[in-house]
Image: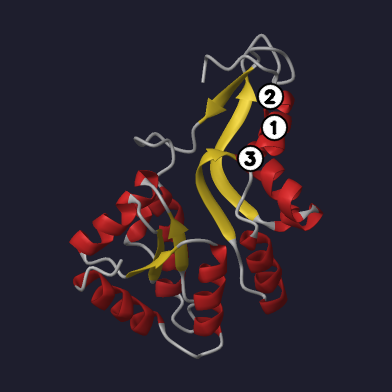
Amino acid sequence: MDSVKNPFPECIHLLCKNIKLDPYFNDFYKWSRDAKVPVIVLSSGMTPIIRGLLVHLIGPEANDIEIVCNEVIDRPPKKKEEEGGWQIQFHDDTHFGHDKSLTIRPYVKHFDEHPDEPRPVMLYAGDGVSDLSAARETDLLFAKKGRDLVSYCEREGVPFTVFEDWNSIMSITRAIFEGETTVKEVAAESAEKAKKGKI
């Protein structure tokens, strides 16, 4: 990131102006708030950028979304607001700077240690290699169509389903939430499609 010298607030402004997020994420988030389904963003990106993009797309209620990723700090002697004044503070010391499985495991451990508490269904959506570590940690993985994550899941036997946009994620999540289907049924259907080469 040393090649990017812009003051950090300017970086956020430029990205908000030029990046288009999946518009269906807004619909998904509104449904999740109404249904009281928690949404947590795990990313190898930077918190202020992701927060800025979400608020830009969704509005101020996006400030309620928990985001776990890398941070941005001053590059002494300069401040983030100055040219060349910022740097990334990685979430952990792993290869991608954020091993997402390490963030998910405490949630799983909590419910393993508290069997009296109803365990929620844990769903995860990803599209790239930085999502591989998280693939095994949740009940069902939404893997972006046409990306490496799909091949990984097929090869490793990780329960998954394919998504093209957040509309398909919302549709399946809602069906699971409302008891119209189960994680096992969704995963089995995807596995069958994969065997027939229909994914």
The residue tagged 1 is: 12
Q: Quick one: label 3, few (<14), some, or many (20+) residues within 10 Å?
A: few
The reply to whether callout 1 and callout 2 are in contact (CB within 8 Å) is yes
Q: Tag 3: residue type?
A: Ile
Percent across and percent down for residue 164 are 47, 61
Question: What distance separates the C-alpha of mark 2 from that of mark 3?
Answer: 16 Å
Indicate which disc residue 8 carries.
2
The answer to which image quadrant residue 142 occupies is bottom left
The residue located at (55%, 48%) in the rendering is 68
Q: Is residue 117 visible?
A: no
Q: Is residue 119 above or below residue 101?
A: below
In the rendered structure, which amino acid carries the disc numbered 2? Phe
* Mark toward the viewer: 1 or 3: 3
> Measured along the vertical axis of the image, is residue 198 above or below residue 84?
below
Q: Residue at x 31, y 62 (%)?
A: 136
Q: Secondary structure at mark 3?
A: loop
Per the model, the C-alpha gap separating discs 1 and 2 is 6 Å
Q: Amino acid at mark 1?
A: Ile
What is the x, y in percent for residue 9? 73, 27
Q: Quadrant of the C terminus?
A: bottom left
The residue pinned by badge 3 equals 19
Q: Does residue 67 appear in this view?
A: yes
> Is 94 situated above or below 24?
above
Do callouts 2 and 3 mark residues in contact (Cβ within 8 Å)? no
User: Would you say 17 lies left or right of 140 here?
Assistant: right
Q: Secondary structure at mark 1?
A: helix
Horizontal and vertical percent position of residue 145: 39, 58
The residue depicted at 44 percent of the width and 41 percent of the height is 98
Mark 1 is surrounded, within 10 Å at the Cα level, by few (under 14), some (14 to 19) or many (20 or more) other residues, namely some
